[in-house]
Image (spheres, rainbow, N blue to C red):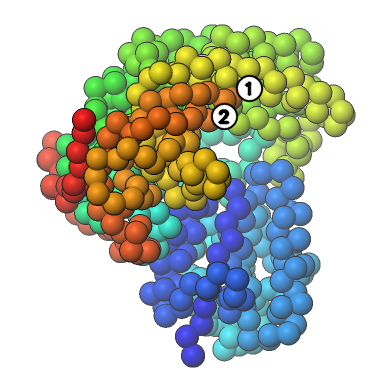
């Protein structure tokens, strides 16, 4: 009988990308996605060890699955990702109804481990210490018809004291640029309009094969790919961010003027304790150069509040950097201990109420800045890639949602189109911003343009795009990439 599967993903974009690879392998092995609302024969939990309460989320999910497993002994539960890499056999000890545990370095083993667990009727735990197969060589089943993740590296060479990623993902391993471009072209040939280049530290890309300017070159190499309309990347590290990347962003038309640059703290003393090898002045100078080259750039960030030993003065310095930086938005986190990290053993762990009060002040300040920045966009024209999942706002306004080129979320009214047929996820529209809120914009007037796309056709047909693993020859940057299928249709007025 055909067996169904469900994947539950926790954590970062890298985990989302890995889950697409897990889905591709399972479907290659004959599994099918479970229908909405139906119990799956195989449930895969792709875990995170970085986000707050990661352990509680995993074991809470496993606890909810236990009665289903008891009632259906043929059901299988698999746990992968960063928490699996960290906890290993502890997961089966705490939850003996789990069938498979696999790590970040062997996501390609899942179908075999599931079959072995069924055959042997006992749990299979396989955790490799280093990467043997780059994830992008594996097949993928993508959720989006119009957007795709492309991993350019895995692992991290930094030693931030709050972060456990290097010990779970390993040292940085870079893909060759020809492989990256081949995967980008394969996605575009399927109708994808937007790719996001992924790495724990994208601007150190190329160090492994001896080219410190490789990331800027890679951005430029994406420019001639016909049909590729938007290129994004995440995340860079301020210590390794160089002017050649800024130039590539400014001079390559399809590279979006959006930058996610993690600050973590505005206090130089705390940055030293975090082992973040830059200081606040260096961080702000990068933002100045980015805005000089791209005045319309939207810059976002990550900030940790309540790091061990953070004083009132340290926190005030963070607030001052936020005032100067004028971020479009910020992902703010309350520090929490991560076993296995140096920060977990540091003196000066702060009381919850102190951290909460500082967190609330930071969020209030950033919300005010975001609102001010967004109000400055009222009356401007935005090009939107219509989004799936962010859907219609509500039945009364009949709004849909899309992402502007700078990454901002915009709710718009899909009326006034000059193209026959409804606006669909994956289509591209232009609209005028009529209202601003701290976390989104609204464009309620008639559309200025609507372009139907192959991605929209695929979304309308309910197609779940599938990509074969990419492992090809390695052309140099000097070789022009092969042409990919162009986006179809369109009009403008």
Specify few, some or many for label 1: CA neighbours under 10 Å numbering under 14, 14-19, or 20 or more: some
| Residue 264 percent coordinates (x, y) | 62, 25
Task: Decide: is 305 above or below 10.
Answer: above
The answer to which quarter of the image holds residue 289 is top left
Instruction: Indicate the position of residue 256 as horizontal and vertical percent values.
Output: 34, 30
For the C terminus, the image quarter is: top left
The residue lying toward the viewer, choosing from 4 and 115, is 4
In this view of the protein, can residue 158 be seen by the observer? Answer: yes
On screen, 100 above or below 439?
below
Give residue 34's position: percent from left, percent from top. Answer: 53, 73
Classify residue 218 by image quadrant: top left
Q: Is residue 352 left or right of residue 395?
A: right
Give the left or right position of residue 211, taking residue 354 as reference: left
Whether residue 470 is situated above or below residue 152 in the rendered picture: below
**Can you identify the residue that label 1 sits on?**
367
Residue in front for this viewpoint, 377 or 62: 377
Asked if labels 1 and 2 touch by Cβ distance under 8 angstroms, the answer is: yes
In what element is the residue under mark 2? loop
Q: Is residue 97 left or right of residue 193?
A: right
Residue 220 seen in this snapshot: no
First in sequence: mark 2 vs mark 1: 1
Q: Secondary structure at mark 1?
A: helix
Residue at x-position 48% and y-position 72%: 33
What crowding class fits label 2: few (fewer than 14 Cα within 10 Å), some (14-19), or many (20 or more)? some
At horizontal 33% and vertical 13% (from top left) the residue drawn is 293
Q: Which residue is mark 2?
A: 439
Please give the name of the residue rendered at 65% of the width and 49% of the height, measured from the top-left corner. Answer: 49
Q: Say which residue appears at 60% left-offset and 71% top-offset.
A: 37
Q: CA distance from mark 2 to mark 1?
A: 8 Å
Q: Position of residue 197 (x, y in %)?
A: 37, 41
């Amino acid at each position: 009988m055909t067996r169904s599967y469900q994947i539950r993903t926790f954590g970062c974009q890298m985990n989302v990308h890995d889950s697409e690879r897990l889905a591709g392998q399972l479907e290659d092995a004959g599994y099918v996605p479970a229908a909405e609302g139906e119990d799956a024969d195989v449930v895969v939990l792709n875990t995170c060890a970085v986000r707050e309460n990661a352990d509680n989320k995993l074991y809470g999910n496993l606890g909810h699955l236990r009665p289903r497993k008891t009632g259906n002994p043929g059901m299988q539960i698999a746990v992968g990702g960063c928490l699996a890499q960290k906890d290993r056999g502890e997961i089966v000890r705490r939850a003996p109804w789990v069938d498979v545990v696999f790590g970040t370095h062997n996501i390609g083993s899942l179908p075999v481990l599931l079959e072995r667990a069924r055959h042997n009727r006992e749990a299979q735990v396989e955790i490799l210490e280093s990467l043997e197969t780059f994830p992008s060589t594996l097949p993928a089943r993508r959720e989006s018809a119009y957007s795709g993740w492309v991993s350019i590296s895995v692992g991290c060479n930094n030693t931030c004291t709050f972060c456990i990623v290097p010990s779970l993902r390993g040292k940085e391993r870079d893909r060759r640029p020809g492989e990256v471009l081949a995967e980008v072209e394969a996605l575009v040939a399927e109708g994808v309009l937007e790719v996001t280049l992924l790495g724990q530290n994208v601007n150190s890309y190329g160090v492994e094969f001896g080219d410190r300017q490789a990331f800027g070159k890679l951005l430029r190499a994406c420019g001639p790919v016909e049909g590729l309309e938007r290129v994004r990347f995440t995340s860079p590290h301020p210590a390794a961010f160089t002017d050649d990347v800024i130039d590539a962003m400014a001079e390559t038309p399809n590279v979006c003027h959006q930058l996610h640059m993690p600050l973590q703290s505005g206090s130089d003393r705390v940055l030293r304790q975090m082992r973040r090898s830059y200081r606040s002045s260096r961080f702000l100078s990068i933002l100045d150069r980015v805005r000089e080259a791209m005045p319309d750039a939207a810059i976002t960030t990550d900030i940790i509040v309540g790091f061990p030993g953070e004083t009132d003065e340290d926190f005030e310095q963070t607030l001052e950097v936020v005032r100067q930086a004028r971020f479009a938005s910020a992902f703010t986190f309350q520090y929490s201990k991560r076993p296995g990290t140096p920060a977990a053993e540091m003196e000066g762990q702060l009381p919850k109420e102190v951290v909460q009060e500082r967190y609330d002040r930071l969020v209030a300040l950033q919300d005010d800045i975001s609102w001010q920045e967004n109000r400055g966009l009222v009356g401007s024209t935005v090009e939107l890639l219509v989004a799936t999942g962010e859907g219609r706002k509500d039945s009364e306004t009949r709004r849909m949602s899309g992402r502007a080129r700078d990454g901002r979320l915009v709710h718009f009214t899909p009326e006034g189109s000059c193209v026959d047929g409804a606006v669909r996820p994956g289509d591209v529209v232009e609209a005028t911003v009529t209202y601003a809120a701290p976390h989104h914009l609204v464009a309620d007037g008639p559309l200025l343009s609507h372009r139907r796309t192959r991605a929209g056709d695929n979304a309308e047909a309910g197609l779940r795009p599938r990509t074969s693993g990419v492992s090809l020859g390695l052309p140099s940057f000097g070789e022009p990439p092969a042409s990919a299928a162009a986006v179809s249709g369109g009009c403008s007025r």
